[in-house]
Amino acid sequence: MKKIISLVLISVFSISISIAKEGMWLPMLLKSLNESDMQSMGLKLSAEDIYSVNQSSLKDAIVSFGGFCTGEVISDQGLILTNHHCGYGQIQSHSSVENDYLTNGYWAMTNKEELQNPGLTATFIVRMEDVTDVVLEGIEPTMTDADQQKMISEKIKILTKEATEGTHYEAYVKPFFYGNEYYMFITETFKDIRLVGAPPSSIGKFGGDTDNWMWPRHTGDFSMFRIYANKDNKPAEYSEDNVPFKPRNFLPISMNGIRKGDFTMVFGFPGRTQEYLTSYAISQIKNEINPKQIEIRRIALDIMDKHMKADAKVRIQYASKYASIANYWKKWIGENNGLEKAGAIDKKREQEKAFMEATAGNTSFEDLMNQFRHRYKTIEPYAIARSYFIEIPYRKIELFSIAAAFRGVLEAEDVSQEKIDALKKSVEKHFKDYDSDTDLELAIALLAKYKADLDSKFVPNFYSKIGSNDAAFYQKIYQKSLFNSKEKLLAMLNNFSSSSAKKLKKDMAYQMMTQFFQIYNDAIRPEYSRLNNEIDSLSKIYVKGLRDFVPGKYYPDANSTLRLAYGQVDNYKPRDAVKYDYFTDTEGILEKYNPEHVDFDLPEKLVDLIEKKDYGQYADDDGYMHVCFTASNHTTGGNSGSPVINGKGELIGLNFDRNWEGTMSDINYDVEQCRNIAVDIRYVLFIVDKFAGAGHLVKEMKLVKD
Ligand code: ARG
Ligand code: GLU
């Protein structure tokens, strides 16, 4: 009897554990959905300690960093920690060949030396509210989509206005579960965020694109910033009079080390997941969209790489662009391999079959899967053309980007001096990181690919003028175009008149860009959006059906709102006979060290410290300096820089990546294969203190050791 009970318990327990590790949960629902589960896994706090409106809680230490990453407050003086790759654009923008902070790192030794970053923000969540009832009141399924959307946006406008009236807060409302629910977030955004420190790329980006998305990893992927506020501790634009922000809360740092099985949670702003896609959608992503985007990016990367290797200036100019193109290029490859290996499409087909069985007899769902199938078939050419538009003329040809930046001024009736001045600034900024030869080569290769791969209805008519020699045609465009010359553009803007506007509009680069946009706006976007909206409406029905009829614990897809994922420190087995350990140490850094390879070069001082085992207070009890670790927290892009927090609410690591086998988790989470990768917080402190000599920063923090 006892044996039977324990067997039953084990199986129930293992189900709940495996479910528990998947999901990105809404902080305000932790109490009802997750608290007991989390506590059974090792959480020592209550849901209220993590998210509370009434008292300071962990959420008050978490910021959306610039809207694209996460950061956390780690001192009572507004010091925030995020990834090196999140601060990369800022570090790069302060860098030049003479002052190369990308290569050498940067450390402010006093507050005065902290560098301002115009445009960079840090946003706290003040509170969130379930506003589903208000938003959906009076919305009838018989109304057209457009009418529904109109009514919904009006209500959202009123809600956010009421919620922020008389305060310096802002608010947004977002749909969850494809519009079955709505939540409002009240936010406080700080605008004076200064760069405090960053290690050299040989530490912060150690392993580079070779190791990106991979385990085992040895990257010190962190950088530090500080939030500044006005004298009243409120957000303010940059001013010399601003002072370090006094936060409502900050994370203490655990010096106790990390062991397999330890409870972990990741608190941050995951960007986008699509866990409720149908098999039709996944097959389109896997067989059409991903392979095409991978191909386009490979071409772009090879060209950029060639020019970067040939010229030190181009290396710096294109470093950040290269990294971001390479990042998803590699992610999509991993995602496709993972989907294949997991048999994700078949798995979804089975789930769809089970769904149809569970809802049998219910007419709302009878034809649902056919509807999906039909829509995906129809949308496919438009989805592919849209990818090509975004990946090629819109994002990779910068001659077009700068031409597009002129549209506001060239198409307007009157132009204010203010607009002209802003445009001048954009021109300066654009040319700082622009290399005409690189851009030309990208144009030659990618614009040819655009035409070769797409139906003629998606191809603008300037192509008919190209003749037999593509390269010669584009060379001439680049030679002649005003948009290829900073001096000419600035001269035009300094003396702006209707005749300069005319000239610029006649420029071939401007015309080509305009034609691409026209094609997109007339031949691609309308049909794509129409079908995509229909797919969203079907998805709303599907997800509601799943939640009503198929038992399970459902979490909403990531949508850049604050979420908590929880799991445990864990290793994984990528393939037969191979088992990875859950942490790496500095011995592994030396194993990878290769001065001949940019991705694996190291600063001499770090080699020295490691060889002498001069780890200070930061080594593990095992005597080694641990570097990175893996855990089973469900994360995605946007979770970069998120804190990995232990059961007591202390910082143990900084999230920065996922394993390659697990990058499919945006579509198909698999508890056996999906891991997030974090840098051990003790390695971060070791670099700050022992390597950079910025121990004063560590003194600002609160280190705890039992
Ligand atoms: N893969 C990580 C993330 O998605 C790190 C990216 C850093 N960029 C790079 N190309 N190494 O963003
Ligand atoms: N590196 C990613 C980011 O920038 C996080 C890794 C992931 O996608 O899980 O947000």
Image (cartoon, grey):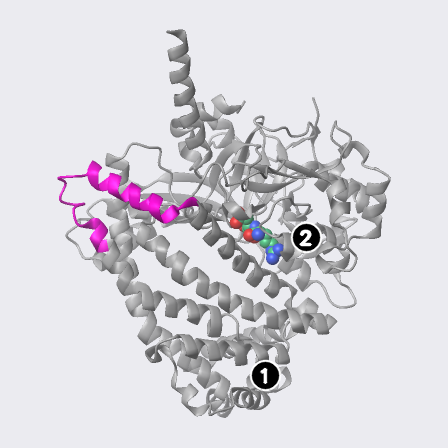
Looking at the image, residue 32 lies above or below residue 467: above
Which residues are drawn in magenta? 342-371
Front of the two marks 2 and 1: 2
Q: Amino acid at mark 1?
A: Asn
- Mark 2: C-beta under 8 Å from nearest atom of ligand 1: yes
**Residue extending furthest front?**
577
Position of 666 with respect to 89 (left or right) is left
Circle 1 sits in a helix, a strand or a loop, which is it? helix
Whether residue 338 is situated above or below residue 649 in the rendered picture: below
Magenta segment's dominant SS is: helix
Residue at horizontal 45 percent and vertical 83 percent from the top: 512
**Magenta residue check for 564:** no
> Magenta includes 359?
yes
- Residue indicated by mark 1: 484
**Can see residue 472?**
yes
Residue 284: where, in percent of width, then height?
Answer: 36, 58
Q: Which residue is mark 2?
A: 207
Q: Who's the residue at 62% across and 77% down the image?
A: 438
Residue 181 drawn at (x, y percent): 31, 43
Residue 495 numbered tag:
none
Quadrant in which the C terminus is drawn: top right
Query: Which mark sits nearer the N-terminus, 2 or 1?
Result: 2
Say which of 526 and 117 sits in front.
526
Identify which amino acid the numbered label 2 is placed on: Gly
